Image (tube, helix red, strand yellow):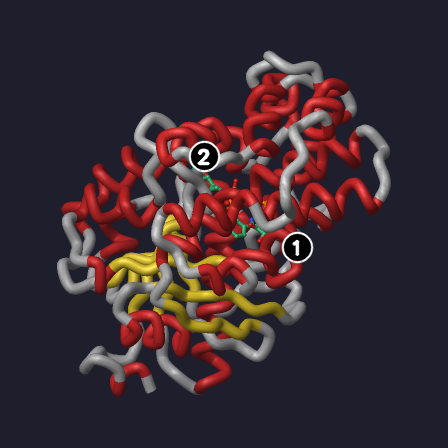
Amino acid sequence: MAAEHQGREPLERIAVMGAGSWGTTFAKVLGDAAEHHGSRRSIRLWGRSPEVVADVARHRNTRYLGDIALPAAITATLDPAEALEGAQLVVLAVPAQSLRAQLTAWSAHVPRGAVVLSLMKGLELGTDKRMSEVIAEVTSLPAEQIAVLSGPNLAMEIARSQPTGAVVACTDHGTAQWIAEACTAPYFRPYMSTDVTGVEIGGIVKNVIALAVGICEGKEMGDNTKATVITRGLAETTRLAVALGADLTTMSGLAGLGDLVATCSSKLSRNHTAGRLLGQGLDAEAVGARMTQVAEGIKSAPAVLELAQRLGVDMPITAGVVAVLRGELPVGKLEPLLLARQLKSEGD
Ligand SMILES: NC(=O)c1ccc[n+]([C@@H]2O[C@H](COP(=O)([O-])OP(=O)(O)OC[C@H]3O[C@@H](n4cnc5c(N)ncnc54)[C@H](O)[C@@H]3O)[C@@H](O)[C@H]2O)c1
Ligand SMILES: O=P(O)(O)OC[C@H](O)CO
């Protein structure tokens, strides 16, 4: 099926770099998709923990996914070169702030014709670059070989085969379609887009807004408050995305509104959880110490704010979250600060 697009061959050899919650779950999606379509496929999962790699050999990743069984097509290795050898698709699922260093170490082993797909939802601190931009810089691959996937994709729900949608974006529609076909499973429905910027910005900023909603929850505020933060959060996400050249419609789609709603409402969300702890009075350091998995919004929030300020985009919720994270604003002052802002029209 995939061979019909851009002369690409069927997707049989995939490397997934990162054996945490999402890397492992997406490997499972790819394995289940191949099984569903009766296709041959080898999925090599790179992990840095010997225990996790040994567990995956027994078709489990207990640390991240409990007793969920993994498809036989998935094997795991500690050796990035072994994972990457001959890969047609390289899927990246490590914490955003570690990507540049890791990919630099791996890039000599990335096959030149491979497409690189980012699953990550973070903005690089210090450069304010999106993951697709970091990938382009480190690998020098052309845009048609760089794709991103985002949407309301809480890993544990997907690992349990609960249905969801996602968006695969690449400037080249054929590449997006090739990937979308390869990851279509009975419980996973990808849509295609050429709006890489919009899809990434939706995924990055929803983590910051989820921190804000988590703060509301930690302070035991009600649903009106949370709905207001979600809605105004979408407004500031949209302002940033459009200033960066994204399509407005992406923001009302799965990678915008869809992911924002999922992350802001779910107890499974690490960003939402981190926000709740902030709302209960813990400082950023104490919250970081409690988290066993990455909550990208904590590190990305200052980068999002810096990017917005550089573009002259107003992002008051993000600014408030950053001030709380930096310890510059007591969490109890966030609400009065946001409510006391100058009156404005809703569309502004
Ligand atoms: N978990 C989800 O539900 C989900 C869904 C969609 C997108 N994402 C995104 O996917 C990316 C990966 O998230 P995840 O949930 O798999 O994270 P995780 O914390 O569950 O796993 C991260 C993995 O990266 C590895 N790793 C490699 N280098 C690392 C380093 N320098 N520091 C820390 N860990 C390192 C860890 O060992 C671990 O296997 C994030 O950008 C996240 O926003 C996650
Ligand atoms: O657990 P979180 O907060 O990283 O969110 C996971 C996914 O991004 C939800 O789509």
Q: Amino acid at mark 2?
A: Val
Label 1 to label 2: alpha-carbon separation: 20 Å
The mark found on residue 42 in the picture is none
Dot placed on the residue nearer the N-terminal end, 1 or 2: 1
Residue 63 seen in this snapshot: yes
User: x%, y% of residue 158?
Assistant: 61, 63
Identify the residue under disc 1: 262
Residue at 72% across, 49% down: 266
Q: Is residue 282 above or below residue 80?
A: above
User: x%, y% of residue 304?
Assistant: 45, 34
User: x%, y% of residue 222?
Assistant: 86, 41
| Residue 11 picture quarter | bottom left
Confirm or reject: label 2 Cβ below 8 Å from ligand 1.
Answer: no
User: 10 Å neighbourhood of mark 1: few (<14), some, or many (≥20)?
Assistant: many
Question: Which quadrant is the N terminus positioned in?
Answer: bottom left
Decide which of 148, 209 is in the foreground and name it.
209
Residue at 67% across, 68% down: 162
Numbered disc 1: secondary structure: helix
Decide which of 173, 10 is in the foreground and name it.
173
User: x%, y% of residue 226?
Assistant: 76, 43
Q: Amino acid at mark 1?
A: Ala
Residue at 28% across, 76% down: 174
Identify the residue under disc 2: 304
Confirm or reject: label 1 Cβ below 8 Å from ligand 2.
Answer: yes
Residue 270 seen in this snapshot: no
In this rendering, the label closer to the viewer, 1 or 2: 2
Numbered disc 2: secondary structure: helix
Question: Which quadrant is the C terminus positioned in?
Answer: top right
